[in-house]
Image (cartoon, rainbow, N blue to C red):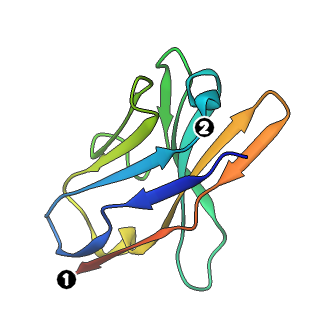
Amino acid sequence: QVQLVESGGGLVQAGGSLRLSCASSGSIFSIITMGWYRQAPGKQREQVAAITPGGNSNYADSVKGRFTISRDNAKNTLYLQMNSLKPEDTATYYCRGWGRSRDYWGQGTQVTVSS
């Protein structure tokens, strides 16, 4: 069983930066696609960014140019560097890993951006 544990959330002022991390307990990390999702109160969960095992990434239009997803397969860790944060980025951020008939989610980490 793979566990995903997010960290790095917190309270930051608009324009600031945060770096989220997602540590995986399983060796399957290196062969599955990983992604970050977020869910704001009263809204549906949405994909923020995703990255393939080979490093190809894509982003939601709302975060392009501000967020960067990366992965370290040797450390089984996924990252999300978030710059120029806006109040509308406030949400619970979730790490997800999927592929090979598997689908794993972390418990989430709260990001709050004050104006």
Identify which amino acid the numbered label 1 is placed on: Ser
Q: In this view, does 95 lie to the left or right of 9?
A: right
Q: Residue 102: horizontal and vertical position, in percent?
A: 80, 38
Can see residue 61? no
- Residue at the spot of label 2: 26
Identify which amino acid the numbered label 2 is placed on: Gly
Q: Residue at x 44, y 49 (%)?
A: 22
Question: How many numbered marks appear?
Answer: 2
The relative height of residue 63 versus residue 55 in the rendered view (above or below) is below
Question: Could you tell which of marks 2 and 1 lies nearer the N-terminus?
Answer: 2
Label 2 sits on a secondary structure element that is loop
The dot on residue 115 is 1
Q: Residue 78: horizontal and vertical position, in percent?
A: 43, 40
Q: Which residue is drawn at 64% across and 65% down?
A: 45
Q: Is residue 39 left or right of residue 99?
A: left
Task: State yes or no: discs 2 and 1 in contact (Cβ < 8 Å).
Answer: no
Q: In which quarter of the image is the C terminus?
A: bottom left
Q: In this view, does 100 lie to the left or right of 115?
A: right
Pick the residue in front: 105 or 11: 105
Pick the residue in front: 81 or 3: 3
Label 1 sits on a secondary structure element that is loop
The relative height of residue 90 versus residue 73 in the rendered view (above or below) is below
Residue 105 image-quadrant placement: bottom right
Name the outermost residue toward the right.
101
The dot on residue 51 is none
